[in-house]
Amino acid sequence: MVDKAPALAGLLQEVSSDTVTAADLASTPSQVCGTAPHLVFDMAGIFDDDSKEPTDPFTLYGTNRKKYAIEQLQGEKIIARKKGFTVTTCVGAVPAAEESPQFQGLPVAGKLDQAGNQTCRSAEGIELKPTCGSSCRNACTAGFDAYVQANKDFSGYVIDSKDQARVLKSCIRQCTYECGKPGKVFDFAVPFRR
């Protein structure tokens, strides 16, 4: 990114003999030192072309359910069990506008049930950490992608790719951390407030 401060400082020195306000620059930008209006606004960072699309704040809610065995099923019937871990992770997003005081009083699992785009993924493995990582990565990716698509369909805006990567990384990290704790069920939440 080009440093615009020296050019802006030079421009302001040239017009320092008169008192110039932002309103003056906006009303008569082409009269300031013969500079084109887009150059003045570009140097000042006003009306920047590469600005992000607006994104409503939201929170990703999730839960991990662990079983300390790998079950082989035939329909609904368990026919065998073997040593290992089965991790089921569910993730859903809720816009901040829908988080009422009654909603805030719910536990994370209840908030996840209220999410309209809840996505669950399971993974099985011999070691807990890689199994948690696989389940969390798949569930966070699927749940967040569902929210991004729903947000795009509703508002027409796409969440910035850097923000998507940041939220997805936070979701996977928080989910994997909670999943690695001893116990059977752990919840997590990843807020996005930009």
Image (tube, rainbow, N blue to C red):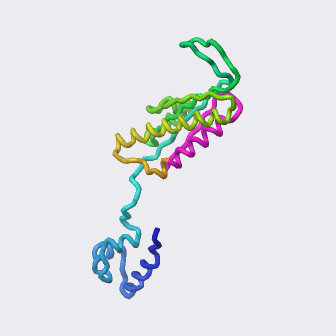
In the image, residue 144 sits, relative to residue 1, either above or below, namely above
- The picture quadrant where one finds residue 138 is top right
In the image, residue 7 sits, relative to residue 181, either above or below, namely below
In the image, residue 74 sits, relative to residue 106, either above or below, namely above
Check residue 183 for magenta coloring: yes
In terms of depth relative to the viewer, which is nearer, 71 or 180? Answer: 71
In terms of depth relative to the viewer, which is nearer, 59 or 143? Answer: 143
In the image, residue 50 sits, relative to residue 93, either above or below, namely below
Give the residue displayed 45% in from the left and 33% down from the top: 117
Q: Find residue 139 and report its horizontal and vertical position in percent.
A: 53, 34
Q: Find residue 160 and report its horizontal and vertical position in percent.
A: 44, 51
In terms of depth relative to the viewer, which is nearer, 127 or 67? Answer: 127
Q: Find residue 94 and report its horizontal and vertical position in percent.
A: 47, 38
> From which residue to which does the magenta span run?
165-194
For the image, the number of numbered tags is: 0
Check residue 112 for magenta coloring: no
Q: Find residue 174 and report its horizontal and vertical position in percent.
A: 61, 41
In terms of depth relative to the viewer, which is nearer, 111 or 179? Answer: 179
Q: Is residue 135 in sight in this rendering?
A: yes
- The picture quadrant where one finds residue 42 is bottom left
Give the residue displayed 59% in from the left and 35% down from the top: 134
- 68 relative to 3 in the view: left or right: right
Give the residue displayed 65% in from the left and 14% down from the top: 80
Q: Is residue 107 in sight in this rendering?
A: no
